[in-house]
Image (spheres, rainbow, N blue to C red):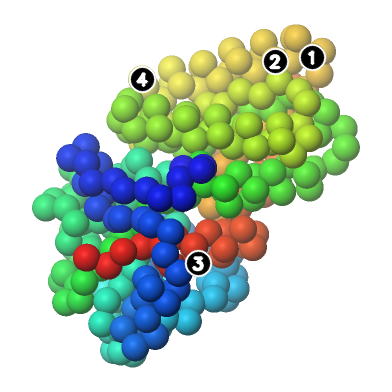
Amino acid sequence: MVGRAVRTERTKRTGFWSVVSALSIASAAPASAQTGLVVVAHGADTGWNNRIRAVMDSVRWTSGPSALAFLMGPENQTAGWDTAMRSVMARGAKAAVVVPLMVSTYGSHVRQIQYYAGARDSLPPELAQHAMHMSEKPSVPVAVTPGLDGSAEMVDAVAARWRSVNDRDRRRPVMLVAHGPNDDDDARHWFQDLERIGAGLKDAGFAGELRSGLLRDDAPKTVRAAAVQQMRDTIQALAARSADSVVIMPILISTGIERSKLPKDFAGLPVRYSGEPLAPLPQIARWIERVAREASIP
């Protein structure tokens, strides 16, 4: 989260066990220790994955070998968790830092990564079918960092995307839209981080009304329908007060050839879309470097 220079989380609720402290590269992972870096992204089609590769190309990690893993999509079989972990160990890593390249720590896929790393006893029930994608626990100590959450780099990246839209859209109300989790308690964390991002847009010069919402794509249909309807009502109210359209800014790690559901969800409303993803903005690479550098290997 923003402003957390020193962060320790070890809770039963999340199973999160990374200790993040303000350490230098030398103290966190001396060169002789050969600490590997594994960045794990959701994964989708080639276009989606290539944006993540562009991020990795600009990551500076001098403490050991690095690798990229995809949880889903066609490349899961050739560039999945096992492949990435074996790669860094084969190149001399005696420990590894795993960075979930996810919008939020509070979701099933980060817990999936924690399970793969040995930090949880079981996969989230909704992802149990993905157990086939992982055949072995790492044979070296592994630390798992948080997701992007409301980090300073996340805030800066979204502000950069907002600054890239045209002058007229920068004066319109904004609706931040994120995927969102299944669980209501997790959703509260997502909303807290969206508030931090919204505050960052204000600091960047945004002067209009701003609201945020979650699609809850993987939640039961009734939960998702209620979440979309709430956003529709909010958009209509924003448009009425401003007598203008509302700019929809999806908070996305990457995009590929898949079609967004948003036009259908918000059909008939006075909206405009700013759909550029966070990757491959340089802020994302800097975030990876920072959280990996600050992670404490158990």
Residue drawn at 49 percent across, 62 percent down: 290
- Residues at circles 3 and 2 in contact by the CB criterion of under 8 Å: no
Res 222 label = 4
| Image quarter (top left, top right, bottom left or bottom right) of the C terminus | bottom left
How crowded is the residue under tag 3: few (<14 C-alpha within 10 Å), some, or many (20+)?
Answer: some
Q: Secondary structure at mark 3?
A: helix
- Residue 54: horizontal and vertical position, in percent? 59, 70
Q: Amino acid at mark 2?
A: Leu
The residue indicated by pointer 2 is 238
The type of residue carrying mark 4 is Thr
Callout 1: SS: helix
Residue located beneath label 1 in the image:
242
Q: What residue occupies the far right of the structure in this picture? A: 167
Tag 2 and tag 1, C-beta contact below 8 Å:
yes
Where is residue 234 shown, x and y percent of the image?
60, 15
Quarter of the image holding residue 29? bottom left
Q: Residues within 10 Å of mark 1 (few under 14, many from 20)?
A: few
Pointer 1 and pointer 3: residues touching (CB < 8 Å)? no
**Label located before the other in sequence (1 or 4):** 4
**Residue 5 placed where, x, y %?**
46, 50
Q: Residues within 10 Å of mark 2 (few under 14, many from 20)?
A: many
On the question of residue 113 being in view, the answer is: yes
Q: Which residue is mark 3?
A: 289
Query: Answer yes or no: do the residues labelled 3 and 4 have beta carbons within 8 Å?
Result: no
Q: Residues within 10 Å of mark 4 (few under 14, many from 20)?
A: few
Q: Is residue 226 left or right of residue 83?
A: right
- Per the model, the C-alpha gap separating discs 1 and 3 is 41 Å
